[in-house]
Amino acid sequence: MEQLEVTVKQLESVVVIHAAGPVDTTTAPSLQEPLLRAAESPSGAVQLDLAQVSYLSSAGMRVLLLAAKALQKRGERLRLLNVPQHIHSLLNLAGFTSFIDVNS
Amino acid sequence: MPDSNIKIEANTWQRVPGTVSVEIFPIIPKTNCVSSNCFIFSAPDALVVVDPGANPEQTRQIIRVLTDALALSQRPILVFLTHCHQDHSQETGRLELPESVEIKRFAHQVGVEAMKHGDPNLTVNYLYPGNPGICSARFEGILFASSPASERLILELAHGRWIDLHTEPIAMPDGTTLQRQWLSLGDGNRLEIYHTPGHSPCSITLRVGSLLVLGDLPFASNPGVCGLDGWNHADLLQTLRKVDWLLEIPDITVCCPGHGYCVSAQSMREKLRLMQAEASNLTDVPLLDAERITALKIYVDELLEETAALFTIFSGRLYTISYYLSLLKEDSAASRILATLDIDRIDSIFSDFRRIAEAFSNSAVPEWTVVLKGVQVARSLQQVLCAEHVQQLLDLSLVDRAQRRLEDFLSIVHGLQFLQTEQPRAVNDLITEILRRTKEATVTKPTDLMEALDDDQAFLQALTRRLEARSPLRYIDFEFAPATQETNANIGAERLDDILTNLMEGMAGIGVKHISIATRVASGHVEIRLSSRERIDPAAFGKRRLDLYNRTLGWLGGSLECSQDSGGGEFVLKLPALQSV
């Protein structure tokens, strides 16, 4: 089974998380933990780079929702970077782009 | 799940119901199509092995169990095959025991001939990659041989003993005959064998005491199983009636299938009756050969990509609603919304399928397994979608689209022709209807919230309804140039609606803001063009999803093409005009 690799880069005022692989029910927890840790920290923007994500299931969407909710509490929005077009399309159709910033 | 009324446990010896001195040791692996269950019986005069299977690890377990049983009492071993399929028969010749142990093998004459001649079709050997090898063991017991001399078959054993196989057909109340043979297991116990063709011409059912071993009869009408080489519709219907009659006999209490858990006779009877209803429609099922399995495997991949996308969008919309409800501090309403669909279960169903599909890509599992897994996934999804609380959701269009794809898939795998159950409709009218619906969904009704202000629950429901009604097509600027001629096409309105809506929503998903729709009639086809000023990358839709739409249209004599030029992108759907059919 293809694995999800997650790396975290702490820059001065932003945390950039890179995910590579499929984000589904099996792999989503390995993204959820670092993403929520960053989103629930008191300050700093959070960016998630999806350039290497091959597949995003509803379990992946749930993780994005949890991070967006945590960031919203401190008035921030989750920013997704390098979103593959097919995932961008799903996020669009699901209405996620109304509360998450997406850069393709 | 095991039947809680039945106390037949795997991997342990237990008394066979209805006998005083026969025990059974069932080996029931996790259900799969690569290797079958195996049932070992210990009787005073013999050890009986039914269906050794096709897993060398299972063979080692069988040998250990037999060795222990022989240590208690030396007896001949009688190996029976419920039929000659690879997953039941492969290991038959590999039960390596000391030379002093006598092994006699039994199978229906047709199966014995198939294995003897290495027939890859009747043994369904072709379904399994890696050339696993067809059972080449010698069969001393030819069951239901066509020669009249076989009315009584005597097999000699060492020390002046013998096995006497009696033939005693049963006259059925409806005037037909159930072919039966039997042999003594000692101490008044009998092993009865019935010829039960349908799944395969060599299928048999065995009875010991109150227990029946049915082989693969309970699966014979399943999509992906019916149509295998040797499958026969008329035989299957007759066999189902005969076994139903057998199960009427009050002292049969337990039924053991070739795959999965043992169940009560009552449960099996209910299942077989459902099968009778299902099987009665299975006329003209095409042969499920290697070529068709390959085509079905591709179809499974496409279907799963399509339904996974629809579910992801649908569950994403529920998450979006829950997000906004949470912002309004309506956390319990947010949780309720998410509970309407078992998102985690659906996600794990897809994840499970993806693992099987990946294993296939690594050549670890046969193509057939992927098809059967696809059937299992489709049925599980249908179950989730039929749940009452899902049906209460306000916007069911995505769910309905997924349901229709699943139904189509199961029909096709069943071997039924692509079912056109809907009425065709003029394409111009359908497009007008879709555009009207899109506008309707975008209309805001300020009064619904105002009217509900005094009632918290009603307000919340109105709010949820508003959030759900946000069509992804709401920001699209449409332009429609209808053909002036009749545009009746030979495709069901719902299927065409699904394809058009999915394509247009997909275009909205990749940021298209303006869609020009044009229809025209030419060369016996109704043509629909969906054009945008932006380029359309097929990869953004998922290539397999587009392949699925093309395949669906293709079954009906149409096609789908995607093209690009400097002016933008375009989908062209060609549908057979109704009068040309």
Image (cartoon, coloured by chain):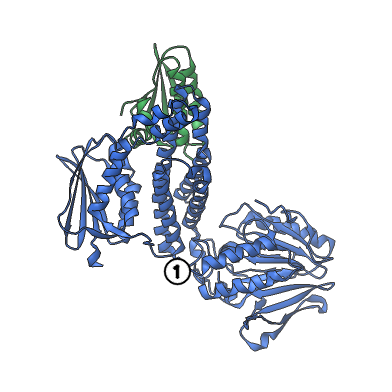
Chain colours: A green, B blue
Residue A51, percent from left and from top: 36, 30
Query: Is residue B232 something that shows in the picture?
Result: no
Left or right for B442, reference B283:
left
Q: Is residue B436 visible?
A: yes
Q: In which quarter of the image is the C terminus of chain B?
A: bottom left
The residue under the point 27% across, 44% down is: B436
Relative to B56, is B456 above or below?
Answer: above
Camera-nearest residue between B447 and A95: B447
Depth check: A67 or B487 in front? B487
User: Circle 1: is it few (<14), some (14-19), or many (20+) Cα within 10 Å?
Assistant: some
- Residue with the mark numbered 1: B285
B363 lies left or right of B161: left
User: Identity of the amino acid at label 1?
Assistant: Val
Residue at 62% from the left image edge and 82% from the top image edge: B176
Q: Which of B579 and B271 is in front in this view?
A: B579
Residue B532 locus on image (x, y percent): 20, 40
B477 displayed left or right of B136? left
Nearer to the camera, B264 or A12: B264
How many numbered discs?
Answer: 1
Up the image or down, A55 lies above or below B386; here it is above
Could you tell me residue A26's position as x and y percent? 52, 36
Q: Which chain carries label 1?
A: B
Question: Which quarter of the picture shows residue B59?
Answer: bottom right
Q: Is mark 1 on a helix, strand or loop?
A: loop
